[in-house]
Amino acid sequence: MKMKKIAAIVLSVALSAASVMSVSAAATDGILTVGTGKVVCIDAGHQAKANSETEPIAPGSTVTKAKVAGGTHGVVSGLTEAQLNLAVALKLQAILEARGYTVVMCRTTNDVNISNAERAGIANANKADAFIRIHANGVANSGASGVVALAPSASNPYCAGIAAQSQQLAQSVVNGQCAVTGQKNRGVSLDDTMSGINWSQVPVTILEIGFMTNPSEDLNMANADYQAGIATGIANGLDVYFSNLVVTP
């Protein structure tokens, strides 16, 4: 592990994030007005303890999944995915509120017990204009890295009506994050098996912010400045999404 190289990467991202935030703050007649009147629901994926009880993966479905899976963990940092997701989510909340967005948080602590369907219900009840579900990846291959955003397909039997906007949202936030952090952009993956997507009635994406099973990426994501860069990139992506939103029938 080349610690100096990792530290340099973190510093570079911190400077990049600060630069982006500075530019945004100066654009008082531009990007900061995008959030006015917009409601963003943020779900920091997972929680302190998994809930193995099951629930349908969608309204009316006979297929069930655990209400909340345990998530992955950092191979070097030791952070749980729930801890990382919440740290980024809270930073994103602060940035979005500063830009004029109304933010609804599914959770602000790790000590909760909220199922994936219930989290989607929070976004639905608040008529969110965007539902951002923050997660992190974990795989056997320690070399895998980068950011991917999940969205429903147009043939999703439960929420096809939000598929096009969800895909636009997913592309915007994955692009936004990677533009700030320099991570590999793995694009948008269409997935119709996720409870938190299928129960949603509002545009939704699951953003996998990086691989906790990659030692370098894990250490980067454990750093508070790097987390701020991730959050800034997501916020920038939301600004772009709402500025360029194309609503299809």
Image (cartoon, grey):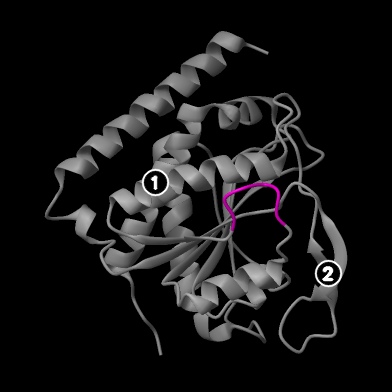
Viewer can see residue 236: no
* Residue 180 image offset from top left, x and y in percent: 40, 38
Answer above or below: position of 249 versus 232: below
Left or right: residue 184 compared with residue 47: left
Instruction: Name the residue type under label 2.
Output: Lys
Question: N-terminal of the two: label 1 or label 2?
Answer: 2
Q: Quadrant of the N terminus?
A: top right
Q: Which residues are magenta?
A: 107-112
Answer above or below: position of 63 versus 26: below
Please name which of the two marks, 1 or 2, marks the residue nearer to the observer.
Answer: 1
Tell whether position 108 is magenta: yes
Q: CA distance from mark 1 to mark 2?
A: 32 Å
Residue 94: numbered disc: 1
Picture mark count: 2
* Residue 93 image offset from top left, x and y in percent: 43, 50
Instruction: Name the residue type under label 1.
Output: Ala
Tell whether position 239 is magenta: no
* Residue 50 image offset from top left, x and y in percent: 81, 53
Viewer can see residue 120: yes
Residue at the spot 36% in from the left edge and 81% down from the top edge: 247
Answer above or below: position of 223 versus 27: above
> According to the image, label 2 marks what residue?
65
Residue at the spot 16% in from the left edge and 55% down from the top edge: 30
* Residue 175 image offset from top left, x and y in percent: 43, 50
Q: Quadrant of residue 154?
A: bottom right
Determine the main secondary structure of the stretch shown in magenta. Answer: loop
